[in-house]
Image (cartoon, helix red, strand yellow):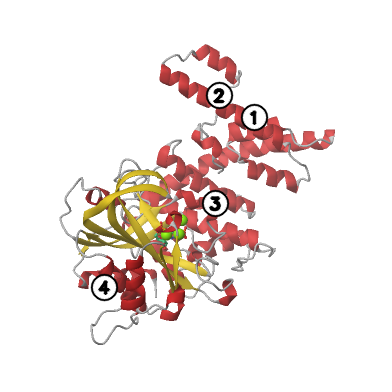
């Protein structure tokens, strides 16, 4: 089943159950406390918190999401993208657990060609491969799963609040959740359900039961329940790419129909073969991870630019810049030095336009923004490469490691991530004085914080700060205070 058909089946099923279709909101979060939309429920937050009254009591959506917190997992696990689509069904004071759970089950297990009695189409998953988790004290959910739906007891696992309790982190609505996992089989890990192995058992769907009013939230496992909510809500999220990976019989989400063409193009441009391995000890693993990352980040960049984000040095623009740079550096580490990003993003556009026609309608502007960013970064890299080469030569002559000061200057002035410096130095068989590098990074961070504090308190004495910073002005400003932690 193609991704586009998953979306269609999702909308059809919940429309038949009287849900109002709500189009995806922008990736730029409508909620001011968030940079990006990170879940299907984000556009509905005012309804859940009671700030606004919803115009419907049931809604269905397929929401574009960006999660930067997962960036280091991309390509290494089978299931984490920086961009993904969250299919959601929502109840605002309408149905609750007793309806949400059987609907989820029905949709997942009804045959793709449809149930002859109801006419509804589903995803045709084998019920014996599905496992569920519930919050440890949620006996209600247990009974619905076991009694009403018929899931055997040994495939229902109870988890603590860290995993299966939802809060906003603040006083307000909260409640237990229940998640559905798909068993990929013994080739993917140990038996024993999601508690044993989350690579073999892939989380596909999270059902959140907002049923309590919390008067205080101290941590994920320490909160105070003031009482039941008058209007209970349902918020669910199913990862479209994760379901696509299962339905398309591929190894991971980067091999699904909306992402794979970019991966293939990157491999072709680099003249390497993608081997689809998840085994970190396999010699092909590093290349495979890089290709998966490139494919994922290219799509994320495409979707962000489409939603109006432009590369910059702060906020969402900085995240976009970082994604694009990781693609370019990834290609470089695969041996491609010519501009390729415009090509990759065109391939991604072709794969996405069926669902998001705007990627094609706005493609002139998108392509221009992408190409401009790539050109600027390639200029920075070539200036940095010259500097790196002379530092390597100096280290070789003196028989010492590459100086930490040089690594720092490459980072600070040319935007060279330490990874790239390490990798290029290794190729030249030179080690790097990483301790000095880290010390200089820490010092820079302290200065930036002091600077920020001084600005806040209104005592900024620019002359003193210029002296502290030394005489050389920083040309490259891509790594601001928060960004010094982040690796491109
Ligand atoms: P995981 O534990 O695998 O990181 P999660 O518990 O953080 O997932 P939720 O916050 O429960 O995910 O989001 C609801 C659903 O969205 C998940 O069940 C999954 O199908 C999907 N999802 C979450 N994060 C990602 C991601 N980075 N890439 C693709 N799909 C995702
Ligand atoms: Mg997660
Ligand atoms: Mg999880
Ligand atoms: Mg989850």
Residue 23 quadrant: bottom left
In terms of sequence position, does the residue under pointer 1 or pointer 4 come before the other? 4
Give neighbour class at mark 3: few <14, some 14-19, many 20+ (Cα, 10 Å).
Answer: some
Give neighbour class at mark 4: few <14, some 14-19, many 20+ (Cα, 10 Å).
Answer: some
Which residue in the protein does label 3 denote? 72
CA gap between label 3 and label 1 equals 24 Å
Q: Residue furthest bottom?
A: 116
Position of residue 397 measured from the top left corner of the image (x, y, whole percent): 83, 35
Q: Is mark 3 within 8 Å of ligand 1?
A: no
CA gap between label 3 and label 4 equals 35 Å
Local SS, label 3: helix
Residue 440 numbered mark, or none: 1
Residue at position x 26%, y 51% in the image: 227
In terms of sequence position, does the residue under pointer 3 or pointer 1 come before the other? 3
Relative to 424, residue 473 above or below: above
Local SS, label 2: helix
CB within 8 Å, label 3 to label 4: no
Which residue in the protein does label 4 denote? 13
Local SS, label 4: helix
Local SS, label 1: helix
Task: Using residue 67 as the reference point, say whether residue 420 is left or right of it.
Answer: right
Q: How many marks?
A: 4
Relative to 257, residue 81 above or below: above
**Is residue 311 at all visible to an observer of this figure?**
no
Which residue in the protein does label 2 denote? 447
């Amino acid at each position: 089943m193609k991704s586009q058909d998953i979306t269609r089946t999702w909308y059809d099923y919940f429309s038949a159950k009287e849900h109002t279709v709500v189009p995806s909101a922008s990736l730029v979060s409508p909620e001011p406390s968030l940079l990006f939309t990170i879940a299907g429920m984000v556009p509905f937050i005012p309804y859940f918190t009671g700030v606004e009254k919803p115009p419907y009591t049931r809604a269905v959506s397929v929401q574009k999401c960006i999660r930067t917190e997962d960036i280091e997992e991309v390509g290494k696990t089978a299931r984490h993208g920086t961009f993904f689509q969250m299919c959601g069904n929502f109840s605002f004071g309408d149905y609750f657990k007793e309806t949400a759970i059987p609907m989820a089950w029905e949709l997942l297990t009804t045959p793709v060609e449809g149930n002859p009695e109801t006419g509804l189409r589903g995803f045709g998953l084998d019920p014996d491969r599905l496992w569920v988790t519930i919050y440890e004290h949620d006996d209600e959910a247990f009974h619905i799963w076991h009694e009403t739906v018929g899931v055997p007891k040994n495939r229902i696992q109870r988890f603590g609040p860290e995993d299966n309790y939802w809060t906003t982190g603040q006083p307000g609505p909260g409640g237990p959740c229940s998640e559905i996992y798909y068993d990929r089989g013994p080739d993917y890990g140990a038996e024993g359900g999601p508690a044993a192995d989350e690579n073999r058992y892939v989380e596909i769907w999270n059902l959140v039961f907002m049923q309590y009013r919390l008067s205080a939230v101290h941590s994920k496992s320490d909160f105070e329940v003031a009482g039941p909510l008058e209007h209970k809500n349902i918020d669910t999220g199913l990862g479209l790419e994760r379901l696509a990976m299962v339905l398309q019989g591929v190894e991971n989400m980067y091999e699904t129909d909306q992402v794979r063409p970019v991966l293939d193009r990157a491999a072709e441009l680099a003249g390497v073969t993608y081997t689809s391995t998840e085994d970190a000890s396999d010699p092909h693993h590093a290349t495979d991870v890089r290709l998966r990352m490139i494919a994922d980040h290219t799509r994320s960049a495409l979707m962000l630019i489409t939603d109006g984000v432009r590369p910059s040095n702060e906020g969402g623009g900085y995240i976009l810049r970082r994604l694009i740079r990781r693609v370019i550096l990834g290609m470089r580490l695969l041996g491609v030095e010519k501009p390729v990003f415009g090509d990759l993003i065109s391939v991604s556009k072709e794969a996405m336009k069926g669902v998001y026609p705007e990627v094609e309608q706005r493609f002139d502007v998108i392509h221009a923004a992408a190409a401009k960013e790539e050109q600027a970064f390639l200029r920075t890299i070539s200036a940095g490469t010259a500097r790196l080469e002379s530092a390597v030569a100096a280290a070789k002559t003196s028989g010492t490691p590459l100086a930490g000061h040089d690594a720092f200057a490459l980072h600070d002035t040319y935007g060279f991530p330490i990874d790239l410096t390490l990798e290029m130095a290794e190729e030249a068989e030179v080690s790097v004085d990483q301790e000095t590098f880290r010390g200089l990074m820490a010092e820079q961070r302290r200065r930036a914080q002091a600077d920020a504090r001084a600005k806040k308190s209104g005592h900024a004495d620019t002359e003193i700060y210029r002296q502290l910073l030394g005489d050389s002005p920083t040309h490259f400003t891509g790594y601001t205070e928060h960004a010094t932690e982040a690796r491109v």
